[in-house]
Image (tube, helix red, strand yellow):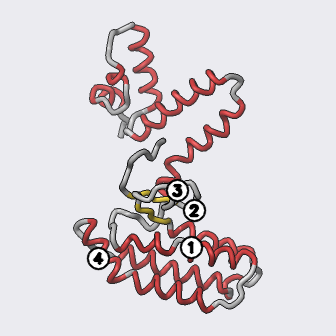
Amino acid sequence: ELVGDYAGCIMCDGYNAYSSERYPQITYGSCLVHIRRQFVEIVKSLKNGSRSNAAKAVRLLNSIFEAEKQLEYQNAKEKAQKRKLHLKKYFDKFYDFLDTILNPSGKLKKAIGYAKKFRTRLEKIYEIGELPLSNNPVEQAIRPATLVRKNSLFATTVAGAKANAIWYSLIQTAKMNGLDVSKYLNYIFSLLKQRKDVDVEDYLPWNSEVKESCVVAN
């Protein structure tokens, strides 16, 4: 229901709900950090992890991120072109290395399988400059919502959970709009107390008057 008839790009991990079979009109990207993370965890679990195949995989992935930092471009189209010119060789080197690992097992087998499964999605960065290598900033932004979801399990009523969700949403939206949350809540409570007949848009965090009254002080 959320996706609807959207036909652009979705940046996601391996969650099966986002599939080309279910939404053939969508182009998918994949997070390179998710791939790297599985190899990093293997290195941490080994006594001599720095000498392992997983460690070499991490170093090869690091070279991709370093090459990305060196790119200079004016727009998304140019970024995609430069990625193909400067990053593709590092991607190819990483995947060629994975092919040299014979009979991997356990967590390493899983990490290699995951990396290979989403190679096609990763390579969309050569076509779509807006796709990032890492989805971490978005995941950090939605983390509070995930915590709220867990906390809401302890709500005693459905109505209470919905009320919590409304206020959490307002608070997070206020933060994203650069507002002082305390000032913002006091602002809307004062309007309610005055029983002013205003449109709901006048209460929302991106309203110009709200921003003027509640912006975080420098």
Whichever of callouts 3 and 4 sits on the residue coming sooner in the sequence is 3
Of badges 2 and 4, the one in the foreground is 2
Q: Secondary structure at mark 3?
A: loop
Instruction: From the viewer's side, name the closer residue of 120 and 40.
Output: 120
**Disc ID at residue 79:** none
Q: Horizontal and vertical percent for residue 89?
A: 41, 87
Q: Residue furthest top?
A: 195
Of badges 1 and 4, the one in the foreground is 1
**In the rendered image, which residue does mark 2 sit on?**
14
Other residues around mark 3 within 10 Å, as few (<14) / some (14–19) / many (≥20)? some
Of badges 3 and 2, the one in the foreground is 3
Q: Are marks 2 and 4 in contact (CB under 8 Å)?
A: no
The residue type indicated by label 1 comes to: Lys
Q: Residue at x 75, y 77 (%)?
A: 106
**In the rendered image, which residue does mark 1 sit on?**
117
Q: Secondary structure at mark 1?
A: helix
Q: Horizontal and vertical percent for residue 63?
A: 47, 81
Whichever of callouts 2 and 4 sits on the residue coming sooner in the sequence is 2
**Disc ID at residue 18:** 3
Q: Is residue 144 above or below residue 39?
A: above
**In the rendered image, which residue does mark 4 sit on?**
81
Whichever of callouts 1 and 4 sits on the residue coming sooner in the sequence is 4
Q: Horizontal and vertical percent for residue 188?
A: 41, 19
Q: Residue at x 65, y 81 (%)?
A: 54
Q: Residue at x 51, y 70 (%)?
A: 32
Other residues around mark 4 within 10 Å, as few (<14) / some (14–19) / many (≥20)? some
Q: Are marks 1 and 2 in contact (CB under 8 Å)?
A: yes
The residue type indicated by label 3 comes to: Tyr
Q: Residue at x 68, y 86 (%)?
A: 52
Residue 213 position by quadrant: top left
The residue type indicated by label 4 comes to: Gln
